[in-house]
Image (cartoon, helix red, strand yellow):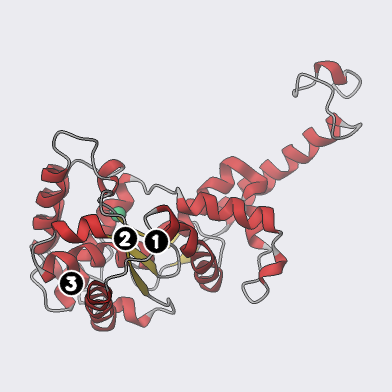
Amino acid sequence: MYSQPRRSYYGRRTQRGCFPGGRLLIAAAVAIFSLISYSGMRQDNPVTGETQHIDITVDQEIALGLQAAPEMAQQFGGVDPDPQAQAMVDEIGNHIVSSSPAGSTEYQYDFHVLGDSRTINAFALPGGQIFITRALMDRLATEGELAGVLGHEVGHVVARHSAEQIAKSQLTQGLTGAVVIASYDPNNPASMRTAQVAMVIGQLVNMKYGRDDELEADFLGVCFIDDAGYNPEELIAVMRVLAQASQGQAPPEFFSTHPNPERRVERIQQAIQSLDQCPGRSPQTSPSGM
Ligand SMILES: [Zn+2]
């Protein structure tokens, strides 16, 4: 293969160098490295009790989330100018964190209302940056429903779903993840080159969680809002609001990768029946598979 660069994997003489075979070798090495590091990296989650495939630290998660936050805000109408809405979200969000096991983590939670009045959405970046759009806020009828949305997003943070996704994407993209992110020093943002930072942030901003992640975030959301003194059934009401909002048009993004609403409601009801399985309560068992 090395003697036939014209018929190499790349299908043409590369303009980047004289050794297309060398690039193949590097690609193979990266792929193998990714596989080894993926299977080798395991961290125990102190809140959920799960063992996860994650190879970045909590500090790296926080730093990446902070760096991606402005771009995320920009995509959804920027910061909402209404200080009352922001104050309410801060108050409820911080109350959920301080009264649940989410508060015992190192994450720095920040809640943001974004000005987009058309896109019904809420999302979390790694490390504690949490967003809700004006459009979703306007459709919620009670403080408890808002708590339900925020509790779900806090669940994504605590369960480290973004970090898991990053680890998975490394498996498929090799160089994108492992080499770049593993060498990222959160105290020295310059340790990652600008183009690489942009790439990772682009990935984070467009990241979609899987079905199981959503169900786990629902479960944790139920637990955390119950900890905070809200009726966990408020999260069921949120599902109804979202289902109604999605009629006759494209489903809200909060839904797009989510399991269907009926299935979600069913699982939320199950979670409400088994609050003793929530993090920080006894008997401390991890609801595996959720
Ligand atoms: Zn979610």
Looking at the rendering, the quadrant in which ligand 1 lies is bottom left
Q: Secondary structure at mark 3?
A: helix
Which one is earlier in the sequence, the residue at label 2 or at label 1?
A: 1
Q: CA distance from mark 2 to mark 1?
A: 6 Å
Q: Earlier in the sequence, mark 3 or mark 1?
A: 1
**Figure check: 89 above or below 166:** below
Q: Residue furthest front?
A: 81
State the residue at coordinates (83%, 27%).
14
Q: Which residue is mark 1?
A: 78
Q: Amino acid at mark 1?
A: Gly
Ligand 1 has an atom within 8 Å of the beta carbon of the residue at disc 3: no
Q: Which residue is mark 2?
A: 115
Give coordinates of residue 16: x percent, y percent. 84, 34
Residue 22 falls left or right of residue 51: right
Nearer mark to the viewer, of 3 and 1: 1
Q: Which quadrant would the N terminus be assigned to in this image?
A: top right
CB atoms of marks 2 and 1 within 8 Å:
yes
What's the residue type where badge 2 is placed? Gly
Numbered circle sitting on residue 225: 3
Q: Position of residue 160 (x, y in %)?
A: 42, 63
Cα distance in 3D space between marks 3 and 1: 27 Å
Mark 2 surroundings: few (<14), some (14-19) or many (≥20) residues within 10 A: many
Residue 216 seen in this snapshot: yes
Where disc 1 sits, the SS reads: loop
Q: Residues within 10 Å of mark 1 (few under 14, many from 20)?
A: some
> How much space separates mark 2 and mark 3, taking CA atoms?
25 Å
**Badge 3 amino acid:** Ile
- The x, y position of residue 100, in whole percent, is 25, 79
